[in-house]
Image: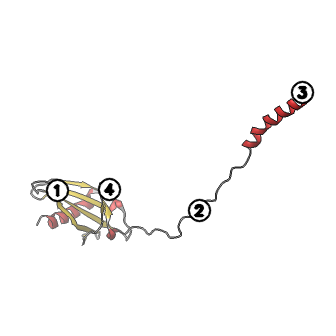
Amino acid sequence: MKSKLVALTLFLMLLPMSANGQAHHVEAVKPMSSRIAEPMHWRDGYITWKGRKISEPDWLMFKGDSGATFAVDRSSIKNISPDGLVISAVAYFIEGDDFDPNNLISFAFGCLSHFTEVVTKQPSERVQFVEKQVKSLACR
């Protein structure tokens, strides 16, 4: 009887170790769709800094003296103050066909004042020429 109890104890002690040692069933990773997403192109639209998608931009292209090409979205030119004295607009530096959010420039400015707010990652010397063009286009 004592040998049966020892054998049962050993069996029970070994049971959890053999259960832990079992290999878990691992499913193979299913491949993603074979269709690769194409990159977004700058002329297709963009997402503003507020996270809103502009679906149908109306781009007007300009070329600077330095050779830089940029476009202004005419559909983004809007009065954003109750008195109509503050206008917002969006411009984009064109460097290739793919959309680069670092090339996007968001403006808010007053046509009758020198107030200008710029949101971009572009250096200020590049933005100054664009700002003049946007103001002349928006403040007619």
Q: Identify the disc placed on residue 51.
A: 4
Query: Could you tell which of marks 3 and 1 lies nearer the N-terminus?
Result: 3
Q: Residue at x 29, y 71 (%)?
A: 67
> For the C terminus, which image quadrant?
bottom left
**Which is nearer the N-term, disc 3 or disc 4?**
3
Position of residue 31 measured from the top left corner of the image (x, y, whole percent): 57, 64
Which of the two labelled residues, at mark 2 and mark 1, occupies the earlier sequence position?
Answer: 2
Q: Marks 1 and 3: in contact by CB < 8 Å? A: no
Name the kind of residue labelled 4 in the image: Gly
Left or right of residue 3: residue 47: left
Label 4 vs 1, first from the N-terminus: 4
- For residue 80, which numbered disc appears in the image? 1
Which image quarter holds the N terminus? top right
Q: Position of residue 2 (x, y in %)?
A: 89, 27
For numbered disc 4, what is the local secondary structure? loop
Q: Residues within 10 Å of mark 3 (few under 14, many from 20)?
A: few
Given the image, on which type of amino acid does mark 2 rest? Lys
Name the image quarter holding residue 19. top right
Question: Mark 3 sits on what residue?
Answer: 2
Q: Label 3 is placed on what type of residue?
A: Lys
Under circle 2, the secondary element is loop
Q: Which mark is residue 30?
A: 2
**Do the residues bearing badges 3 and 4 touch, measured as CB atoms within 8 Å?**
no
Q: Quadrant of residue 129?
A: bottom left
How many discs mark residues in the rendered view? 4
Q: Amino acid at mark 1?
A: Ile
* First reached walking from the N terminus: tag 2 or tag 3: 3
- The spot of residue 62 in percent (x, y) is 24, 71
- Residue count near mark 4 (Cα–Cα under 10 Å), binned few <14, some 14–19, many ≥20: few
